[in-house]
């Protein structure tokens, strides 16, 4: 295999949820740069179209489709629209997630718990199950779930979010085992603290920021684009023998704790 083809996504249809900002937006841009045909999805169509316009302005291929991941019918509509436009899905990147609560788990309301688990786990389960059969018919593919370092650690403030992200890791492992014989790979990426709107409450708080980067050997938090490269790797021929794994990208935070 030529080196130039290692990260080649030319002609591959790549569906990215939560792609209108942050990590998802960065992934959408990098996938397009490597030749992928990107489906940009999030709740707000205008935000998705802004990303699509930026991608097409640089010569990439993309289209926008609004989707609330909490609604099964929205997810099915997203899959159906992609299949109608481009014939199928080769790569699914599940990035959309929520975390409506920050504090001790014992004080979390049932509604907040349900929202976290349904949006971060059940929606990914639904979407993967919608995509997997046609992916198998196409001869294989790759599923990438954006998990979190919170899925590997305990927390006094985002504990249930961490539980949902640990479940995503288990989901990827299970898909890897069930669908591996159909040439489908499934992996997770577990970012540490990244400078996104989603994590703003963590990195904008000077105390929290200082406490976090103290444990990071690189002494800084990550940027969205620093996660995108791993997604391209897992989607492309370069990652063709990796499945059922979780790649931790956290500035050394796990190894730096002590």
Image: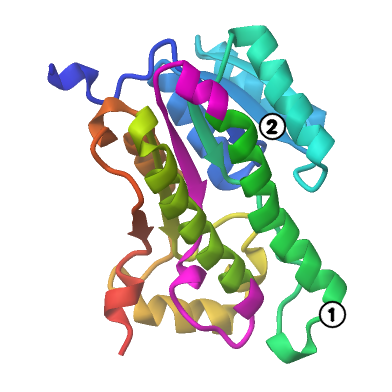
Measured as percent of width and height from the top left, residue 222 is found at 43, 58
Residue in the foreground of this view, choosing between 110 and 257: 110
| Start-end of magenta stretch | 133-160
Q: Is residue 118 above or below residue 1?
A: below
Q: Which residue is mark 2?
A: 41
Query: Image point 46% across, 24% down: which residue?
Result: 136
Q: Residues within 10 Å of mark 1 (few under 14, many from 20)?
A: few
Q: Nearer the viewer, residue 9 or 204?
A: 9
Residue 31 is left or right of residue 245, and the answer is right
Q: Secondary structure at mark 1?
A: loop
Where 255 falls versus 42 (above or below)?
A: below
Q: Is residue 166 left or right of residue 198?
A: left
Q: Quadrant of the N terminus?
A: top left
Residue drawn 53% across and 33% down? 92
Quarter of the figure with residue 181: top left
Can residue 49 be seen here? The reply is: no
Q: Secondary structure at mark 2?
A: strand
- The nearer-to-camera label among 1 and 2 is 1
């Amino acid at each position: 295999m030529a080196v130039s083809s290692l990260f080649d996504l030319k002609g591959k249809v790549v569906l990215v949820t939560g792609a209108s900002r942050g990590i998802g937006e960065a992934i959408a841009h990098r996938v397009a740069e490597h030749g992928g045909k990107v489906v940009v999805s999030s709740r707000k169509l205008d935000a998705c179209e802004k990303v699509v316009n930026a991608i097409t302005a640089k010569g990439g291929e993309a289209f926008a489709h609004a989707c609330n991941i909490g609604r099964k019918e929205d997810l099915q509509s997203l899959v159906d629209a992609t299949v109608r436009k481009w014939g199928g899905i080769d790569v699914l990147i599940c990035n959309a997630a929520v975390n409506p609560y920050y504090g001790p788990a014992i004080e979390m309301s049932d509604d907040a718990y349900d929202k976290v688990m349904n949006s971060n786990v059940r929606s990914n389960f639904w979407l993967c199950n919608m995509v997997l059969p046609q992916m198998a018919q196409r001869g294989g593919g790759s599923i990438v779930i954006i998990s979190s370092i919170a899925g590997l650690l305990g927390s006094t403030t985002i504990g249930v979010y961490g539980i949902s992200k640990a479940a995503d890791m288990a989901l990827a492992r299970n898909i890897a085992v069930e669908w591996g014989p159909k040439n489908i790979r499934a992996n997770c990426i577990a970012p540490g603290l990244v400078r996104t709107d989603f994590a703003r409450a963590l990195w904008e708080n000077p105390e929290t920021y200082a406490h976090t980067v103290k444990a990071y050997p690189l002494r800084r938090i990550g940027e969205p684009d620093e996660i995108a490269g791993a997604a391209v790797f897992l989607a492309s021929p370069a990652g063709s023998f990796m499945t059922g794994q979780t790649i931790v990208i956290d500035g050394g935070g796990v190894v730096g704790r002590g």
